[in-house]
Amino acid sequence: MLVRLLACIVCAAMLSACSRLPEAKLIGTWRYEDEDGIEEVSFHPDHSFWSLETSKKELVTPSPLEETGSWQLKGDQLLLDSIVTWSKDRRQTSWTLLQVSRTALVTKSLEGGKSLTYKRLEEAACTPSPSAIALGEPALLGSWQTHYNTHDYQYRFSSGARVGVFCFISEERQLLLEGQWHIKDGKIFIQFQKNVYGAVEREEDIWTVVAIGTDCIAVKGDSSRPCIMRRVK
């Protein structure tokens, strides 16, 4: 009888431990993609999060739906409380976590009932380098690649203050925007003049340089998320 009681206590303890998923496993950025679209969600240690959704069927210049908010983990339930940035609509959703590993996050929504597998998006930081060249027009010339708003982009800065912006769609590089650029007071100004679809949807990007490393630059624009640009050799 005592042995059976001890076994029950051990089993209960194991089940309780399994139901308490370590929050640290969730920290980071995760990506889900299917034939309809792409979703990226990033969980931060302070229990804030942001998510981006892009439709593949309505692609012009990629302009994803963004949500920001807070997250809580209760057992295997991930509770999300967010605001859609452009409409200010509030959303409260709940995910059941089926699996959390170093590379995969498997969830199931209480609303749709379909399980989704997210892959961890490895994000390398741009570590400031003491030997890095100070930001100036000669240092920026060339091609730089970055991942931003669920897509991979390449910026090609040329002499004569010309810049071309390319997007990788289905592993093919496509020209999206062209314009002019200059640097002033530690900021990069890009004035767009035309895109391949006709009218320019946004006229100017202004980036504040956060860090300069070896073959990398961290910049910050309108979004609260820094963008890492890496030199294409």
Image (cartoon, rainbow, N blue to C red):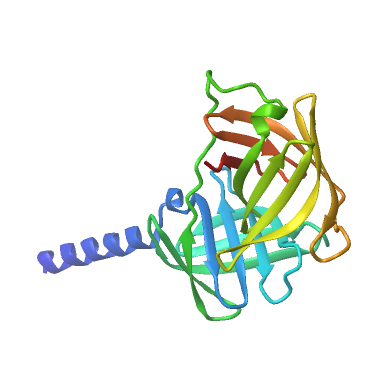
Residue 134 seen in the figure: yes
What number of labels is visible? 0
Give the vertical position of 157 relative to 199 (above or below): above
Image check: 22 left or right of 202? left
Name the residue at the top extreme: 130
Residue 164 placement (x, y as % from top left): 73, 49
Query: Residue 183 location, x and y as percent?
Result: 78, 30
Is the N terminus in the top left, top right, bottom left or bottom right quadrant? bottom left
Q: As rendered, which of 193 and 186 lies closer to the eye? A: 193
Residue at 86%, 58% (x, y): give it: 200
Q: Is residue 165 left or right of residue 179?
A: left
Tell me where residue 12 appears, x and y as whole percent: 28, 64
48 up-or-down from 135: above or below: below
Would residue 121 appear left or right of 1 to someone viewing this image?
Answer: right
**Residue 66 % position (x, y):** 71, 59
Q: Residue at x 52, y 41 (%)?
A: 233
Q: 68 above or below 233?
A: below
Q: Nearer the viewer, residue 35 or 146?
A: 146
Residue 227 visible, this orientation: no
Q: Residue furthest front?
A: 160
Relative vertical location of residue 83 with respect to residue 230 in this rendering, above or below:
below
Judged from this view, the residue extending furthest toward the bottom is 113
- Give 184 or 8, whichever is nearer the viewer: 184
Rendered residue at 56%/41% (across/down): 230
Asked whether, in this view, residue 146 is left or right of residue 58, the answer is left
In the foreground, 83 or 20: 83
